[in-house]
Image (tube, grey):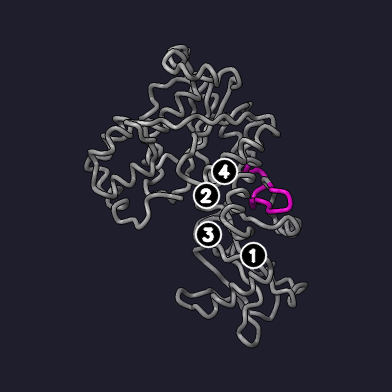
């Protein structure tokens, strides 16, 4: 144990925050935009010499000033952050670190899940956490497979799927946020399902969207109830959304998007291997530059893992592409009637019910409802 005291960064302490940013910058790390707790150790002059942060159940932005390395300060920072997380009730923890630091965190009980070579490593404080997640996915798949019916009617309805069927294997997957579930999402699922005999739907379960996760899950289930051969999985903490991807290791937004895609693919490839998934279906992205870059990298990288990446053209209504962003924009503007042509009846019924009032209010109060 060192002679230094660990202090919590108080909101509004801009001087110390600025010094922490300098410390991180000196170690090649940017202060992450998604943090909900930060601590630090300071020298006799009050300057931070070690720091670490949390965001939900992840540890982030951990560094020790170069002239204080070898004093085991990072061990104390990590122990403190773990204790903070435990007191919050978060027992299953994750962290992101540079590849050069992965061995150090292994000595503290963290195990590697996936890595982007020369960029970052994704780790958890459980030796069987990922294996338990895979077992859950397999159990859900077995249960859903028992209910699968002949999908010939889908192939008849989706004539364009014949082209995809030539390249698609028998089992596919889609990862989506569905914020909220639209006819565009429905079309993507129909086209993918018509191209394979079984389809895995991974719903991003991090509850950071304007439409809360329980609502997103319900609308997805209700909006696909008539489509056979689907299984819905919660992503848990293993499929990382763009909202919580640790971009602080990377220089700019494009590099962050590329890093996010490659880490997502590393995790997804492990899952695909366990579930026999041979294709990942993605929707065409004409609006978001970041998502378009993500899709491009997926189309480059997935085939190297033996997984096809098939991009499906976005569905349009009255000559305009459907997007969840546009649905949120219209709700934000108070135009509930305007979403009717963009969403399934089940989604529309929800948003025109009294039950949706808190979600509608949340969207209408949001400063930003359209993503880049």
Q: Earlier in the sequence, mark 3 or mark 4?
A: 3
> Which label sits on residue 29?
1
For label 3, count other residues whose C-alpha is less than 10 Å away and answer few (under 14), some (14-19) or many (20+): some
**In this figure, which residue is indicated by the disc labeled 4?**
294
Work out how far the residue at label 4 is from the one at label 2, CA to CA, in angstroms: 10 Å
Looking at the picture, how far across and down is residue 40, in whole percent?
60, 74
Q: Cβ–Cβ below 8 Å for labels 4 and 2?
A: yes
Residue 341: % across, % down: 29, 32
Q: Name the one closer to the observer, 19 or 370.
A: 370
Q: Secondary structure at mark 2?
A: loop
Upstream in the sequence, badge 4 or badge 1? 1
Residue at image point 66% right, 69% down: 76
Element at label 3: strand
Q: Secondary structure at mark 4?
A: helix
Coordinates of residue 130 in the picture (x, y in percent): 63, 42
* Labels 1, 3: front one: 1
Instruction: State the extent of the magenta-drawn residues as a range.
Output: 115-130
């Amino acid at each position: 144990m060192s002679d230094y005291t660990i202090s919590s960064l108080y909101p509004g302490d801009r001087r110390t925050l600025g010094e922490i940013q300098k410390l991180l910058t000196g170690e090649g790390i940017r202060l992450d935009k998604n943090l909900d707790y930060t601590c630090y150790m300071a020298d006799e002059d009050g300057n931070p010499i070690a720091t670490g942060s949390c965001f939900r159940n992840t540890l982030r932005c951990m560094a020790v000033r170069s002239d204080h390395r070898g004093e085991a300060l990072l061990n104390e920072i990590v122990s403190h952050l773990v204790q903070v997380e435990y007191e919050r009730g978060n027992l299953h923890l994750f962290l992101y670190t540079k590849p050069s630091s992965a061995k150090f965190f292994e000595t503290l009980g963290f195990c590697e899940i996936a890595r982007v070579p020369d960029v970052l490593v994704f780790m958890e404080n459980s030796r069987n956490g990922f294996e338990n997640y895979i077992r859950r996915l397999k159990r859900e798949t077995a249960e859903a497979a028992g209910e699968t019916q002949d999908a010939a009617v889908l192939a008849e309805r989706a004539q364009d799927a014949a082209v995809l069927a030539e390249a698609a294997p028998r089992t596919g997957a889609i990862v989506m946020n569905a914020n909220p579930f639209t006819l565009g999402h429905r079309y993507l699922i129909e086209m993918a399902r018509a191209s394979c005999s079984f389809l895995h739907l991974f719903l991003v379960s991090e509850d950071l969207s304007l439409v809360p996760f329980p609502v997103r899950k319900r609308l997805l289930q209700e909006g696909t109830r008539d489509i056979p051969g689907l299984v819905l999985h919660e992503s848990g903490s293993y499929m990382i959304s763009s909202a919580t991807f640790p971009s602080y290791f990377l220089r700019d937004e494009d590099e962050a998007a590329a890093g996010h895609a490659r880490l997502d693919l590393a995790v997804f490839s492990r899952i695909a291997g366990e579930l026999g998934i041979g294709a990942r279906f993605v929707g065409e992205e004409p609006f978001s530059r970041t998502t378009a870059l993500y899709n491009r990298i997926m189309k480059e990288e997935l085939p190297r893992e033996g997984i096809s990446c098939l991009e499906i053209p976005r569905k349009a209504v009255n000559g305009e592409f459907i997007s969840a962003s546009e649905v949120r924009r219209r709700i934000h503007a108070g135009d509930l009637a305007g979403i009717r042509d963009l969403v399934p009846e089940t989604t529309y019924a929800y948003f025109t019910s009294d039950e949706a009032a808190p979600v509608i209010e949340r969207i209408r109060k949001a400063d930003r409802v359209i993503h880049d």
